[in-house]
Image (tube, helix red, strand yellow):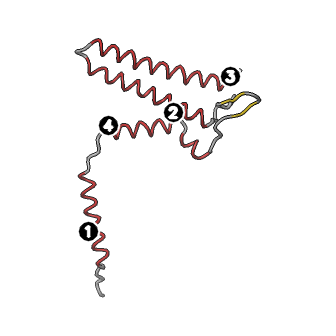
Amino acid sequence: MRKIKPSRKVKSLTYWGRGVYKTLVKLRVPTVLVAVILAGLSIFLLGGGVYDITQNPIAIIPLRGRIITVYPYYIHEQTLTASVGIMILYAIGTAGLIILYESTKYIRNPRQASLMIIVGLTLLVLTFIATESILYVKMYPE
């Protein structure tokens, strides 16, 4: 039985692969960047981004002199406008949560901490009210 030697191309490819692997292992990604990417991906998924890509929904529903941006009476259908609006509202709610978290760092400055808590809670409550009102308009359009 004759032993088959790997060609020079294969040897150089494995050597190149080892170099790439060592470079990637040494690479340090900032945790803030990872957190922002994961939050953006979560907002995209929760807002119906996959549905928007796969189903290609219409943006608005024209109806005799007015424009409707949500499907009335259908909880499992959505327009592109409603989906993007919900994604924006989720992003605002996430910003409110981040501001609430950041307010804990200002414990020695109660004025700034309380102001940040008020702003964060306001964003969070407004997001909740807006999403609930969109759902209510969707279920009971008249």
Which residue does the numbered mark 1 point to in the structure image?
15
What is the secondary structure assignment of the residue under circle 4? Answer: helix
Pinpoint residue 24: horizontal percent, then vertical percent: 28, 54
* Disc nearer the start of the sequence (4/1): 1
Which residue does the numbered mark 3 point to in the structure image?
140
What is the secondary structure assignment of the residue under circle 3? Answer: loop
Label 1 with label 2: CB-CB less than 8 Å: no
Residue at x 54%, y 22% (from the top left corner) = 130
Label 3 with label 1: CB-CB less than 8 Å: no
Distance (Cα) linking label 3 and label 1: 65 Å
Question: As shown in the figure, which amino acid type bears the numbered disc 3?
Answer: Tyr
* Disc nearer the start of the sequence (4/2): 4
* Disc nearer the start of the sequence (1/2): 1
The crowding category of the residue bearing disc 2, from other C-alpha atoms within 10 Å (few below 14, some 14 to 19, many at least 20), is many
Seen in the image, is 65 located left or right of residue 21?
Answer: right
Residue in front for this viewpoint, 72 or 82: 82
* Disc nearer the start of the sequence (3/1): 1
What is the secondary structure assignment of the residue under circle 2? Answer: helix
Mark 3 vs mark 4: in front: 4
* Disc nearer the start of the sequence (3/4): 4
Quarter of the figure with the N terminus: bottom left
On residue 104, which mark appears?
none
Pinpoint residue 4: horizontal percent, then vertical percent: 30, 83
Task: Relative to 109, say whether 95 is above or below.
Answer: below
Question: As shown in the figure, which amino acid type bears the numbered disc 2?
Answer: Met
